[in-house]
Amino acid sequence: MNIIPLQPHYQYRLWGGDRLKCFGFHFDEPSIGEAWTASALKQGGSIVSAGPYEGMTLQALYEQAPELFGIDAPEFPLLIKWIDANDDLSIQVHPDDELAQSLEKEPYGKNECWYILDAPEGSEIIYGHTFESKDALKQALADGNVMTGLTRKPVSRGDFLYVPAGTIHALTKDLCVLEIQQSSDTTYRLYDYGRMETSTGHTRDLHVEQGALASFAPHLDYAEPVLRLDHFRKQLTRNPYFFVEKWNIEREESVSTDTFRILTVVAGSLEIDEHLFETGGTIVLPAHQSFEVKGNATCLVTGVSSLDKQKARIGIDLGGTNTRVAVVSKDGRVEKQFKFKTHPHLEMEATLRTISQAVKRFELEYEIEHVGIVAPGPLDLKRGTFLTPPNLPNWHHQYLVEPLSDLLGLPVTLENDANAAALAEAKFGAGRDVDSIFYVTVSTGVGGGFVYKKQLISGAHGSAGEIGNMIVRTEGPIHHTLNVGSLETHASGTALHERAKVRGLHDTMTLLADETERNKFVDSLATGLANIIHTVDPDMIILGGGVTAAAALYWNQLQDAVNVRVYPHLRGETKLVLQQLKGDAGVIGAAFLA
């Protein structure tokens, strides 16, 4: 027998129940919250259940037969749990490797992920918070009102979430999940609803100081797209600590390993090398082996990520509402990212420190070749400073490039956010097959960028494309930075939102459904686009930004309005299209700045 099946170790938890029996587990004890199906920890090690190594603990097997695993790590690095949350779990956070080694003298921190096995309709988890800083988080913990700032995220059966160390989180009542994590049981409880532990009659310990130290504050929201590997395998995550794949087995498949894999059957039944495993089965597939698998089953398969660092580009989009820090592939794909709320009323140094924290997390996994940052204009690109961006009034005339470069120890390139989005659309999006494009973003503000033969045209002072201040009407609201009658004060998302409020409407979509308001918006935007055509004569104008979500309401009308405003010989010659890269354009363009 080449495969190594494991039997679980059951863990009592205050919040546990007996629903793990529904997944094929057998126990008589009450309040079983966790079944550790692959564990080398002393407080609950797994045991080999069959084959030549039967009766050995996973840790002993790892120490005595390292060739079965094919990795070089002082301790077995992974832990797999099935969890029955029969009640809300505590609000908690886990340390990263550095903090675990410093505070706990443990080799591993606790980065983890969840696969939702069962969830009632309308289920939510706690994932992140809204506190602006560690000081605000500590104050909320001290005042006992931390729950008011926690963020809830809806989940349903089959969902997958990666939970980086530093993320404040909690599972909630009636969820069942499969948890894959680093081999650590270190948890810092921040809040526990005042519950009593029945065995002691006391409330459970909290770890507020350690937890606040370990926490992201502000919260860094992680995202990573699912990557299809072949017809039956999808990669759910690949991070510095482990990877997770989802296998949907419907026929016989041949698989092979370089380093070990742990295969967990989460639904159905699976036959591996003529041995049958039902839901709940957990098997080690040794290194450098080939296997035949068949059946009708859904499996999660995990192993240790390679220590070889890939080269990567970092794109940073510092927006008026959110800031994104992303790893971008050479073909213009966002591989993973952190996002956090921008707080321009705070000192800019706080935002730069948060950006640095995100980049340094990515440096554990990648060799960073380039860091580009984009921000709302106008900017002084030569000095690397903000000038007077309307949406960031507290940061006017502040240096951006030099302090961020000092924090990262890497060179940093700065560009206007609309210019960067233009570059991305020209290289990888709607404009990839033409020579010249002008990109217009209609969002919180209005911005633009011109790209000719895949080169960004910034202008003598870095202000080319700053169309938001272009005058399109003779009247309009007073603005502290922009001209009266400017395009941004008439056609931006902010302008539409203000008009909607005046009319007592809920959103801009409702506003644009009104013919009179739609005509005003279209007239202003069409005038701006016609001016662009007469000025630089691009092959294509690409329209992006949040207001394009309502494009179905005005698109044909807008094209007609542009045509009547240009010379007859130009009508229909400049293509007007919607963006393809959508919300990713800024970070992709940032990553490819020269």
Image: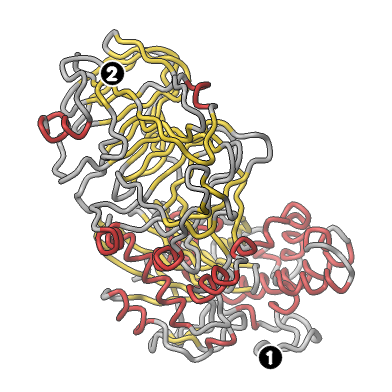
Camera sees residue 421: no
In the depicted structure, whether residue 373 falls above or below residue 269: below
State if disc 2 and disc 1 touch (CB < 8 Å). no
The image quadrant of residue 372 is bottom left
Q: Is residue 41 left or right of residue 420?
A: left
x%, y% of residue 588? 43, 60
Query: Residue 408 versus residue 16: which sits nearer the camera?
Result: 16
Occupied quadrant, residue 76: top left
Residue denoted by label 1: 480
In the image, residue 96 above or below residue 409: above
Label 2, on which residue? 254
Q: Is residue 495 above or below residue 206?
A: below
Crowd band around label 2 with a 10 angstrom C-alpha radius: few (<14), some (14–19), many (20+): few
Q: Quadrant of the N terminus?
A: top left
10 Å neighbourhood of mark 1: few (<14), some, or many (≥20)?
few
Q: Amino acid at mark 1?
A: His
Q: Earlier in the sequence, mark 1 or mark 2?
A: 2
CA distance separating discs 1 and 2: 66 Å
Can residue 237 be seen here?
yes
Q: Residue at x 27, y 74 (%)?
A: 410
Residue 547 x, y percent position in the rendering: 69, 62
